[in-house]
Image: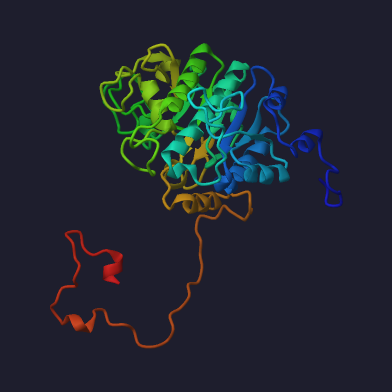
Amino acid sequence: RTASSGPGEGLSGLEEANGRLLSRDDILARVPVGQPAFFTVANSAYADLAENWALLLRPLLRGTTAGHMFVASLDGALATRLLARRLPTLRVGLGSNDTGRAPPQSKAPPVEVSANFRLKFSMFRAYGVTKADLIVWLLRAGRPAVVSDVDCAWLSRPQALLELQPTADVLAGTDCLDTAADDDRSDRSSVVPRCGHHPGSLWSAWFNTGVLAFRPTAEALSLASEWRDRMASVSGKPGENDCDHGCAGAVDDQLTFNQIVAGSPTKGKGEPIYPLRAAGDGGRVVFDGSHRRKIGPVSARVICSGHVFHVQQAVEPRACLVMHLTFVEAGLAGKFWRMREAGLWRLAPEPAGARYLSYTPAQPEPGPLLPARDPALGPKADIPGRSKDGWDVDTAL
C-alpha cells in the first residue's frame, strides 16, 4: 500500500484476501500439490511472537511459488490482530481435528483459549493435538508440512530445509549444543549428551518439536497420525490433565513425539530405537524405533538453538536456516530481548549489528556511603541466614 492510498487500495489480490480468515480449502488452493506449507499455531498470549514469526517469514517466501505460510490462530483476538496486518490466518480450535470438531475421543466442542496454554499440561497437549492434526491434513492433501514454534526466526530461504536429508520421512531439530560432535554422524557408541543422533548411539537421541518438517510419505503420515491420536487419548490421569507446568508425569507434544520415535511409551534407555541404525544419507538419516520410519536429525548448525545462535555464534547467522529460542532464560521477556539483540524484532524495528551496548548508568545521590557491614553485627559476628552455599540475595542485601 502506498502512503496516499486508502483502505484496501494498492493491495495485491493475495494481500486483500489475507484481510479475511482463510479456510483450509483456501490454503490448499494457494499451495500446489508437492509444495510445502509453513505454519505455526498460537493464541493471543503469544500474539507478539506470532506476528513477529510471520513478519520474518513473509519476505523470504515473497515472489516464490514454492511454499506459502499461515498462522493457525486459537482465539479470535489473535486472528483479528493478524488480519489487520494482512497476515494469512486460519482459525482453529484447541484440540480440534481436520473437520473442525473435537477429536473422536472427546465429545467437547473446540475450546477457545487466550491464556498461556503452556502453563497447563492439558491445554499444552491439546495445542499439540491441533498442531499434529494440521500436519495430518496437509500430508493427506499431498503437501509437505513444516511447522515451527512462534519463538522461531526464519533467517534464510525456508524451502532449503526440505532439500536436506532427502531420504528422510521427517526432519526434526535437536537440543544438541556441541556442534562439532553433531557434525560427526559416523557409526559409534560413544555419545555426547544431547547429541546422540548418529548411527550406533545408545542414548540421547532426543528431538525438539519446535521445528519439524514432514514429507508427504506414508510413513510420515503414520507418525503424524499416531502422534495426534496418542496425545488426544491421554485423559483423566493424575499428573497429566490437572497439573501445572513442570509436574512429574505430565505429557506434552514433545514427550509424546519422542516416545513414538523411540518406539516405547516411556522415555529412557533400552528403547527399540537404540542402537540407532543408519537409514541413508551417510548416517544423517536414521530409523525410528519401528525400524520403518526414517528420521532426519537436522544439524544444530542449521536449526540453531538460542544457545548456538546467541552464545556460540554471537548472533551471527552463519549456516543457521532457522533459529529457535531454546536455552533462553526469563521466559517470554527473555525471548523478546534475544530477538531484539539479534535485530529480528519486526514489531518495532531498530538498528542492530553492533557487538556491544554502551550507556551511562544513573549515578548515586551524593552523601555518605553505607557501611560494608551492619554495625549491629559486631566486628566478628557472621551474617545470619547463611546456608552451605552462602546467602541468598535478599538475605545478603
**Residue 201 pos. (x, y %):** 30, 22
- Which residue, as the protein is rendered here, is positioned at the far bottom? 367
Q: Residue at x 33, y 27 (%)?
A: 196
Judge from the rendering whether residue 93 lies leftward or rightward of residue 177; answer left or right. right
Please indicate whether residue 172 sits to the left or right of residue 62 in the image. left
**272 and 242: which is toward the camera:** 242
- Examine the rendering and report whether any part of residue 185 can be seen: no
Whether residue 259 appears in this view of the structure is: yes
* Quadrant of the rendered image containing residue 181: top left
Q: Nearer the viewer, residue 285 or 325?
A: 325
Image coordinates of residue 226 in percent, x first then y, are: 45, 19
Q: Position of residue 385 (x, y in %)?
A: 20, 67
Residue 332 against residue 14 in the figure, above or below: below
Residue 16 is left or right of residue 232, and the answer is right
Quadrant occupied by the C terminus: bottom left
In this figure, which colouring scheme has been used for the structure? rainbow
Q: Who's the residue at 72% across and 45% down the image? A: 84
Which residue is found at the position 18% from the left and 80% from the top? 377
Side of 40 relative to 12 (left or right): left
* As drawn, 259 above or below 241: above
Image quadrant where one finds the N terminus: top right
Q: How many marks?
A: 0
- Nearest the eye: 327 or 228: 228
Residue at the extreme front of the image, as rendered: 107
Residue 205, given in percent of the width and then of the height, sits at 35, 26
